[in-house]
Structures are given as structure tokens and as C-alpha cells.
Amino acid sequence: MNNDSKIILTGIKPTGMPHIGNYIGALKPLIEKSQTNKTFVFIADLHALNSIHDAKEIRQHTYEIAALFVALGLNLDNAILFRQSDIDAVYKLNTFLMNVTPKGLMNRAHSYKAMLEKNAAANRDPDADVNMGLYTYPILMSADILLYNADIVPVGADQKQHVEFARDIAEYFNRTYGNVFRLPEPQIGINNGIIPGLDGRKMSKSYDNTIPLFAPANELKKKIMRIITDSKLPNDKKNPDESTIFLLYKHFANADEIATMRDMFENGKIGYGDAKKMLFEKIDSVLSAPRAKYEYLMAHTDELDSILAAGAARARDTANDTINRVQHAMLG
Ligand code: TYM
């Protein structure tokens, strides 16, 4: 199979405005792939349910993600953009997969283990704040991936284990019931799938160190000026590859601009304050047209409803075909 015939899939949870880490780690690679490959892109609203219990909020965030993908140039001829909960087959497949998934696999999931550690540190019951949606999260995620015969799943490092679980679960299933599922592979982006945030740790809402993708210019600037650096002076030589400023700049600038900033860092021609200003101006100029389109779409959610309905209809064709094969294999 050549690379252009591979099926690409990824999902993103509607839990608020995505940040630049989500964008560089998963959204941008997916949008690029959508120019050449069949891609499935979905808004994982069922996955958001384990943390958000307000329907209005989930609905609003779902529109935000849909608007964002369209505004950033997802190719809607090749890409099927849809809401996870619109496809009934995913609930069915989730139930079917429960029965071939060892409980031990769920015990090993990083996200669940992180909760256990957090509770232990706070001297709380190990399973405090763990609902079954969180505990079985990787099974639903496997259903998402296997339902659409995905070959490649672009994700950040934090989701790699979940994609590997989907592959493990598909293998258990195929061993028992014959060759029903295609085996997916995670595709981890640059910097080993970890885009750093303002404080140098992984960019994540839980660390409060994010740069929102479509923040207003003054907020964007304020955030960028907060990026933590070492104490080197403007004339000191600096290693650009150890700098969050340069790492983020690389994803928005062209080759000449990147070479210029690299030279400035390596030869002591720029201070961090000025480098941050360059980064702000670059991000602001690259994202200003998509931000305007995003704002237009958020004011015309009926257009988003039509895009999501068309996407669901296309996704359903593939999903129904898979679920029929699974049901036949398991129940005859
Ligand atoms: P979510 O919504 O938390 O994140 C969306 C994507 O962004 C990546 N990401 C990062 N990449 C690099 N550096 C960072 N600092 C960073 N922070 C986040 C995430 O790894 C992810 O790829 N469970 C998924 C949603 C999902 C899904 C799926 C993904 C549901 N079903 C099936 C792929 C396939 C999630 O919560 O992602």
C-alpha cells in the first residue's frame, strides 16, 4: 500500500479552545495529510463526558473544534469531519470490545495510573474521582480507531499508549474471531510528540502553561512574553534547539525565516525579549486569516451543523460496514 492510500484518523476532545501543542502535535499533521489521503477527523464528545457534565458546554466546544478545523484548511473532500456521538456503531463496538479487553490492560493505562498517583499523594481513596468512563476510556478510543479501519493515527506522546492498546485489542480480537480489524499505528510528531508550554513542561491545560490557538492578539502577546528562558544575555550564543521560542517559531515560519532566527540565536545577535516579539508577530500573522474565518463560522453555526451532518453520513457508511462484520463474527 503506498502512503497516499493509507487511512488517517484522529480525534480531539471538545474541552475548550485547543492550544498550540494540540495544533502542532496533532491538528497540523492531520490537516496536511488531508490534502492527499482519506482522513477521518472527529470531535470526541463522548470522551469529554467523563470530565464535563454540562451539555451546553460540550455543544459549544464541539462547534469550536469543528470551526477550527475548517478555518485551518482541512480538505473537506478527503476529510470526513464528524461528531463521535453521531455514529451509533461506536456505542455498539465499545460494548463488543469490552468483552475481549483484559481488565489488566486498563489498569496499566497512563491516564488511570496518573489519577491513582494523584489520589495517593493526597491521601484519598485510590479510585476517588475515577468514573467508569475514565477507566474504560481506552476501549472507546479503540472503537473509534478500529471502526474506520485507520492505518495511521497522528497523536501527541500522551495518546501513544492508547493507540497501542487499540492495536493490542484488535490483535486479541483477530486471534479469536479471524481477521476483522486492520492494525493501526500511532504517528508521533516532532519533538517526540511533546510540545513544551510556557514553563518548558509539556503544554497542557492541567499545567496552566498553554498558548490558546485563537487567542486575541493582546492575550497571545502576553502569553508569549511569559515563556520561561534561561538568563543568557542578548550577545550570548544560545542553542536554538533548546529553546521553546525557536521550537514554536519553526512551526509557523518559512525556511528562510527559520534560518535567520537560528543564526541570531547561535551568534548572539538577539535577546530573548526580541525573539519572543518575533514569535508573536509570526504566529499572529499566520493565524489572523484562519482566526477571522473561525469567528465567521462561530457566528454561523448552521454551516457547521451542515458540515457535521454531511461528515456523519459519510462516516456512517464505513462504520456500519465494520460493525456488521464484527457482529457477524461475534454473534453469527
Ligand atoms: P486531546 O483532545 O487531549 O488532545 C488532542 C491531540 O493533541 C495532542 N497533544 C499534544 N501534542 C504535542 N504536545 C502537546 N503538549 C500536546 N498536548 C496534546 C494529543 O496527544 C492529541 O493527539 N483521547 C484523545 C482524543 C481521542 C482520540 C481518539 C485521538 C479520542 N479518540 C482516537 C486519536 C484517536 C484526547 O483526549 O486528545
Image (cartoon, rainbow, N blue to C red):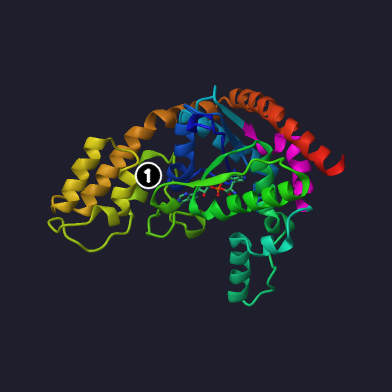
The quarter holding residue 89 reads: top right
Q: Nearer the viewer, residue 84 or 276?
A: 84
Q: Give the x, y percent position of residue 299.
A: 55, 27
* For residue 117, above or below residue 182: below
From what the image shows, is residue 311 above or below residue 218?
above
**How far from the left and from the top, in percent, is residue 151?**
57, 39
Q: Main secondary structure of the magenta part?
A: helix
Q: Which residue is mark 1?
A: 220
Answer with the quarter of the image where residue 9 lies.
top right
- Residue 93 in magenta? yes
Q: Is residue 128 above or below residue 246?
A: below
Please identify the quarter of the rendering in which residue 84 is found: top right
Q: Residue 24: x, y in percent?
A: 42, 43
Other-residue count near label 1 (Cα within 10 Å), few / some / many at <14 / 14–19 / ≥20 = some
Q: What is the x, y in percent for residue 2?
A: 49, 31
Magenta range: 82-98
Q: Is residue 239 left or right of residue 89?
A: left
Q: Tell me if I can see residue 49 in this picture.
A: no
Residue 184 is covered by the magenta coloring: no
Residue in the picture at 71% in, 55% down: 136
Vertical relation: 177 (above or below) 256: below
Residue 146 shows up from this direction? yes
